[in-house]
Image (tube, helix red, strand yellow):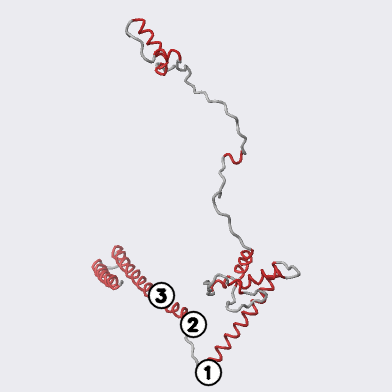
């Protein structure tokens, strides 16, 4: 059923005409002739003007472009070489490094035709730069794997030379009467052993206290069951329970 209230606004001019004819209105309203010349629409459906259809990609219709406003990733040729080296030598990351530069042009002072540089300690970055130099300046145009093997061999030789020099310096110092304290590794092992020994003592004491409690409660339960079955007099069971209860209270009080 159509709701007639929706059409009341459409019959305003008709009602006003009937009221003028019947004499209920003495003069025409100000809007009477305007509404008569431009009547309101009789359709309650709003017409939409035709529009041209735009062809769109069906995939992008329901998908928003991701990472539109994100900056592009900055990559350098050394990044892959550096990742490969530290993946094969993770303990090199544990060595201390100096990241402070004086003028920001330290790379111009290095000659990577050789591995060891003046004023720069030997580290993983030396291998990366040496490998990159071999790939760019070798006349035979060697591959990245071949350059990596060559740079890594030079790195191992220099590391071995450093270890030999360090051991020789320690032996010479001890021969001259120098004494060295314990290393950080030895100090850490001693502290760990100390805490493990304390943990062992505390665990043994806890287990002994727990066993003592369990044995006390078992004796009390056995005495009560024996008295119920008539194996021992009830008075002895009560005395035993009282004594064991007192002993259990002492153990509980003594237990922290």
Question: Which mark sits nearer the N-terminus, 2 or 1?
Answer: 1
Question: Which of label 2 and label 1 is nearer to you?
Answer: 1
Residue position marked by numbered label 1 in the rendering: 176
Going by the image, does 60 lie left or right of 46? right
Going by the image, does 33 lie left or right of 71? left
Residue 41 in the image: x percent, y percent? 47, 17
| Cα–Cα gap, marks 1 and 3 | 42 Å
Pointer 3 with pointer 2, Cβ within 8 A? no
Question: Which of label 1 and label 3 is nearer to you?
Answer: 1
| Cα–Cα gap, marks 2 and 1 | 20 Å
What residue is rendered at 49% in x and 90% in y?
179
The numbered mark at residue 131 is none
What residue is rendered at 60% in x and 85% in y?
164
Residue 22 in the image: x percent, y percent? 34, 5
Crowd class of label 1 (few under 14; some 14 to 19; many from 20; radius 10 Å): few
Residue position marked by numbered label 3 in the rendering: 199
Residue position marked by numbered label 2 in the rendering: 183
Q: Is residue 1 above or below residue 172?
A: above
Quadrant containing the N terminus is top left
Q: Is residue 166 above or below residue 86?
A: below
């Amino acid at each position: 059923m159509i709701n007639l209230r929706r059409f009341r606004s459409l019959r305003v001019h008709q009602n006003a005409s009937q009221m003028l004819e019947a004499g209920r209105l003495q003069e025409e309203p100000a809007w009477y002739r305007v509404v008569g010349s431009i009547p309101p629409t009789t359709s309650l459906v709003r017409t939409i003007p035709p529009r041209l259809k735009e062809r769109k990609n069906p995939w992008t219709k329901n998908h928003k472009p991701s990472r539109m406003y994100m900056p592009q990733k900055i990559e350098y040729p050394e990044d892959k070489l550096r990742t490969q080296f530290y993946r094969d030598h993770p303990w090199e990351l544990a060595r201390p490094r100096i990241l402070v530069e004086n003028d920001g042009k330290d790379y111009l002072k290095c000659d990577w035709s050789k591995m060891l540089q003046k004023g720069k300690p030997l580290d993983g970055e030396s291998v990366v730069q040496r490998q990159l130099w071999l790939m760019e300046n070798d006349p035979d145009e060697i591959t990245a794997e071949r350059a990596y093997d060559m740079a890594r061999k030079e790195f191992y030789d220099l590391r071995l030379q450093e270890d030999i020099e360090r051991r020789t310096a320690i032996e010479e110092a001890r021969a001259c009467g120098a004494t060295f304290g314990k290393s950080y590794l030895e100090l850490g092992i001693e502290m760990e052993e100390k805490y493990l020994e304390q943990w062992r003592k505390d665990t043994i004491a806890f287990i002994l206290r727990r066993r003592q409690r369990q044995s006390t409660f078992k004796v009390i339960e056995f005495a009560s069951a024996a008295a119920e079955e008539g194996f021992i007099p009830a008075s002895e069971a009560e005395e035993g329970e009282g004594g064991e209860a007192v002993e259990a209270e002492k153990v509980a009080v003594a237990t922290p």
